[in-house]
Amino acid sequence: MRGVFAVAVHPEPAIARSKGVRRALKSLITLGALSLLSACSLWPGYKKPSVDLPVSWKVEAPWRESTPKDTTPKGPWWQRFGDPQLDALIRKSLSDSPNLAAANARLAQSRALVASASSSLFPSVSLATRAASERISANRPLTNYRSPNFSTIQDNFVVSLGVTYEADLFGRVQRTLEGVRASAEQTAADYENTRLLLTTDLATAYFNLRQIDIELDVLNRSIELQRRSLGFVSNRRDLGAASGLDVAQAQALIDNTLTQLDILKRQRSQFENAIATLTGTPAPLFSLAADVKRAPPPEIPIGVPSDILERRPDVASAERAMAAANAQIGVAKTAFYPSFIIGPSFGYQSTSLPTLFDTPSTIWSLGVSLLQPLFTAGRLQANVDFAKAGYDLTLANYRRVVLTAMQEVEDGILGGAALDRAHAQAQIAIDSSSRVLDLATTRYEGGVATYLDVITAQQSLLNAERTASQLHGQRLLIAVFLVKALGGDWQGATTLGSR
């Protein structure tokens, strides 16, 4: 149940001098002042939560911490890889991706909501007109017992200008606006996060595809070598220096390598289709030529752990969600207090259009309405409890996002150092396998070893080269992962030592 109190002031001298009206206005003003004083603690003041952060990362050589600054503009991090093809693909994805277009539309919606909520701070003005011809009933209740009822038809022309304004005495409108603004800022952070995820997902798919290109090149070179070996063994068999078993083993090795080649081609097509979708291109119309160059991964600035609170858009989004939830607590609490609506109006009314704007046709009113909840069966308190629980939910989510961010950065740092060492060792393994293959081939040609030794050496070299190509791709992928974990890149930031 809600109580409604209203008072209207009219220009008639008798009513203007009415002591009852003045007392009513005085009572409303007094009630409003007392309610305003009691509303000083309607809502909790919002403070950005603090999260326990380590002072530094557990870095391993050759990593070292840099000092990127949040005031430095974020740059196109993908250009650090020095790959023109990747640059072109990311530019296309930023312009044509439907996911980013949807995020941009959500951002436009949130800004429109801010503009809509801001309008509540100002009065709303409306113009109303009415033209009607009315017949008055002869059987209506009597308004003057001295004169009989009669039926008549009369015209009615009305032009009025009305103003409606809610006096925000208890901060409901302001707190609603704060919540909408925080939600809009959260949507802006979500847009940046969508942009970051789009570019990192595209770079991940791209480097996976390029890593497969290198593996395919390794397999093609291995197949060429194996076919030469098959021809050599076949000639030795024709001369009686080799057995049919040697030829069969050489052919089996080729068949196995060709099988791996088909598997990799299928994987490459899947990454190619993923890139097509991320760039907003139909998969059947998209293709990428093979490229086997091996560019080293770039240097990525990591800064100190507290940087992630300023750099990662998902952390910013989670924090803005908390601010919006905190504002909703205030909005829920203001429902316990009365709302004041001021509604003056001014216009003209006449039964004749030519006299509509004459002075005697003037009409006006000045009214103030008060709406005070009296009994709601616990609904208002339940709304407050719901808003508080929503804030606790956003607080827990904020802590989860920060902890996940620190985990991802630490994984990227340690994983990058481990991959660097593994890649260096893989290059050593390739050199060793090449020497083993040369020795096995020489011994077989000299008749002191079986062809199985040659096959084993060839397979060992193939595995070493494929492992090295995979590790090269993993180093590029871990660099992209670290960029994603750090929330982007800074142009001109101090970088890590040479990797």
Image (cartoon, helix red, strand yellow):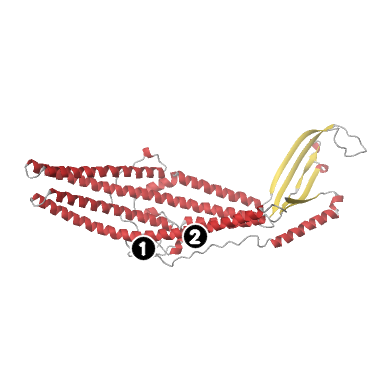
What is the number of callouts on the image?
A: 2
Q: Which mark is residue 496?
A: 1
Is 175 on the left or on the right of 477, as rendered?
right
Q: Quadrant of residue 270?
A: top left
Q: Earlier in the sequence, mark 1 or mark 2?
A: 2
Disc 2 is placed on an element classified as helix
**Residue placed most toward the observer, 243 or 22:** 243
Disc 1 is placed on an element classified as loop
> Which residue appears at 79% of the width and 58% of the height?
26
> Which residue appears at 9% of the width and 42% of the height?
237
- The residue sitting at the bottom extreme is 55
- Residue 479 in the image: state x and y as whole percent: 36, 56
- Residue 366 in the image: state x and y as whole percent: 77, 50
Query: Is residue 72 at least partly visible in the picture?
Result: no
Q: Quadrant of residue 138?
A: top right
> Which residue appears at 85% of the width and 35% of the height?
140
- Mark 1 or mark 2, whichever is nearer to me: 2
- Residue 292 in the image: state x and y as whole percent: 28, 49
Q: Which mark is residue 399?
A: 2
**Residue placed most toward the observer, 155 or 169:** 169
- Residue 403 in the image: state x and y as whole percent: 45, 60
Is 361 on the left or on the right of 432, as rendered?
right
Is 3 on the left or on the right of 332, as rendered?
right
The amino acid type of the residue labelled 1 equals Leu
